[in-house]
Image (cartoon, rainbow, N blue to C red):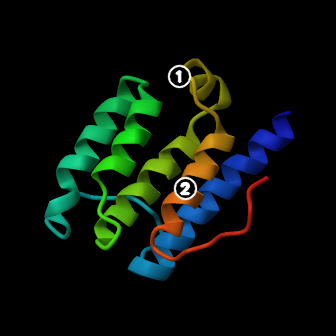
């Protein structure tokens, strides 16, 4: 079980980093509200608040509901969000009603809205 969790964590982080590098030319998928993408700043802030409160399912739903599939800023927000989930330990995610598998699938689903298709995470 631990091996699978470690593998999923690495997959999530690798996918998020690939998005950051290929689309944004960044080494890390960190979204920084510095004025580059002001339209996505409020969503990013709300996602961080929900993550702090461990309301992960609600945060993921908000991400999909509030994102515009034609604005790349939201892709970076998603990469940041899922990278953060990938860095959380399995117990924290489980206590929040979430898992690394769900995070990997969510990132895959979100990326597909932008025409990005990673290998299956199962």
Q: Picture coordinates of residue 17 (x, y %)? A: 54, 66
Residue at (25% x, 39% y) in the render: 46
Q: Which residue is mark 2?
A: 107
Residue at (62% x, 23% y) in the render: 94
Q: Picture coordinates of residue 102 (x, y %)? A: 62, 41
Mark 1, other Cα within 10 Å: few <14 / some 14–19 / many ≥20: some
Q: CA distance from mark 1 to mark 2?
A: 18 Å
**Taking 83 as reference, is 43 left or right?**
left
How many marks are shown on the rendered structure? 2
Residue at (82% x, 35% y) in the render: 2
Q: Which residue is mark 1?
A: 96
Quadrant in the picture for residue 40: bottom left
Q: Residue furthest top?
A: 95
Q: Is residue 34 visible?
A: no
Q: Relative to 10, does residue 92 appear above or below in the rendering?
A: above
Q: Secondary structure at mark 1?
A: loop
**Taking 7 as reference, is 103 left or right?**
left
Q: Is residue 89 visible?
A: yes
Residue at (58% x, 30% y) in the render: 98
Q: Relative to 1, does residue 11 appear above or below in the rendering?
A: below
Q: Picture coordinates of residue 36 (x, y %)? A: 18, 70
Mark 2, other Cα within 10 Å: few <14 / some 14–19 / many ≥20: many
Q: Secondary structure at mark 2?
A: helix
Quadrant in the picture for residue 6: top right
**Taking 93 as reference, is 39 left or right?**
left
Q: Picture coordinates of residue 117 (x, y %)? A: 62, 72
**Label for residue 34?**
none
Q: Given contact means CB atoms under 8 Å apart, are the residues at marks 1 and 2 in contact?
A: no
Q: Relative to 103, does residue 88 appear above or below in the rendering?
A: above
Q: Is tag 1's residue or tag 2's residue first in the polypeptide sequence?
A: 1
- For the N terminus, the image quarter is top right
């Amino acid at each position: 079980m631990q091996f699978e969790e470690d593998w999923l964590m690495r997959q999530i982080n690798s996918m998020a980093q690939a998005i950051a590098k290929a689309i944004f030319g960044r080494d890390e998928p960190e979204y920084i509200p510095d004025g580059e993408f002001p339209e996505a700043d409020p969503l990013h802030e709300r996602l961080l608040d929900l993550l702090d409160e461990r309301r992960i399912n609600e945060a993921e739903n908000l991400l999909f509901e509030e994102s515009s599939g034609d604005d790349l800023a939201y892709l970076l927000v998603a990469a940041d969000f899922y990278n953060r989930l990938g860095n959380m330990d399995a117990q924290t995610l489980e206590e929040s009603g979430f898992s690394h598998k769900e995070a990997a699938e969510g990132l895959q689903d979100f990326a597909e809205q932008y025409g990005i298709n990673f290998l299956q995470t199962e």
